[in-house]
Amino acid sequence: MDEVTIIGAGPAGIACALQLARQGICPVLLEGDSPGGLLRNANLVENYPGFPGGIPGPELAGLFLSQLASVGIIPKSLRVLLLDHREGAFLLQTGESSFSSRIVVVASGTRPIPLEPGRVAPEAGGLVFYEIVPLADKENKRIVIVGGGDAAFDYALNLGRRNEVVILNRGVKTRALPLLKERVAGAKRIRYIPGAQVEAVRPDQRQGLIIGVDEGGKRSILPADYLVCAIGRAPEAEFVSPGLKDARDLTERGLIHFIGDVKNGMFRQTAIAVGDGIRAALMIAEKLRKERDE
């Protein structure tokens, strides 16, 4: 049985693993996707201390992973399908195996909220994305982004350097930071359309997509090579058994910790996630120290 297992190798999970290593504790770090979390999509991280002028998200994620490797921790590429607590230990089931751990840190982040069912034709699904990592190398494409928040505008700025981008916001107002709105307004290859609802997405007979748009009752067709949906995110905790989500006793005993975006709602910031990870690691180290001294 492992002593400490961390589920998720985003900023929170990585920070937790790094701090545990400093305390002489070697955790098991699991990641079902690519390590780095949402940082891999970020155009520019400007509020993380230590980087005047900001740093591209993928670059910061790479630095996190390099530091992780420097202390000998390599994330295991395993997706946890079920987390439960039985007979005094946590049971983790993956697609390949199952194993147990005494203490678990859930740093699984968030999952994207999809477009309403029926709006995307099944044949078009391969050209619809919820993150922009797969599109990072695309050039001279027409990309439509659905959303009106920070993520949609940040994605547009990232992709708009080498592509034509259209942002469709179903609302009249946007929730994006004023700084992001200002940058989008000044970008020559980005067009912003408020009050635009996506009605249907189907494949073009030649290539790409045909997107049906309703702008306040005025319907139009918008061709695109790709569609990116950034309409919100929800906690990625479906693998956690119902009993554990409200397991106050296990939480109070310091046996399970929920950290980072999986619990922070709208406050999805790298610095907050890192602080969560370090705090959880310190609490775990203190718990284990007290047990050794008893």
Image: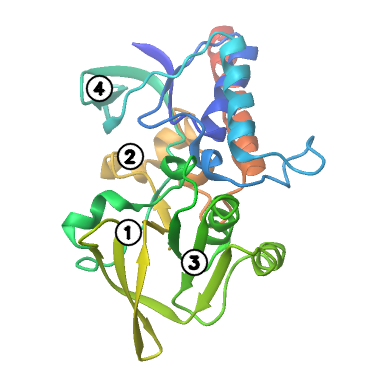
Q: Which residue is mark 1?
A: 114
Q: Quadrant of residue 197?
A: bottom left
Q: Which residue is mark 4?
A: 87
Q: Which residue is mark 2?
A: 244
Name the mark nearer the viewer: 2 or 1: 1
Sequence-first disc among 2 and 1: 1
Q: How far is disc 4 from disc 1 in space, using C-alphas?
A: 37 Å
Q: How far is disc 3 from disc 2 in space, using C-alphas?
A: 42 Å
* Direction from residue 38 to residue 116 in the image, left or right: left
Q: Which residue is mark 3?
A: 166
Query: How many residues crowd mark 2 within 10 Å: few (<14), some (14–19), many (20+)?
Result: some
Q: Quadrant of residue 149?
A: bottom right
Find numbered disc 4 in the image and state the secondary structure of the residue it sits on.
Answer: loop
Sequence-first disc among 4 and 3: 4
Q: Amino acid at mark 3?
A: Val
Name the mark nearer the viewer: 2 or 4: 2
Q: Looking at the image, which residue sits at the far bottom?
A: 217
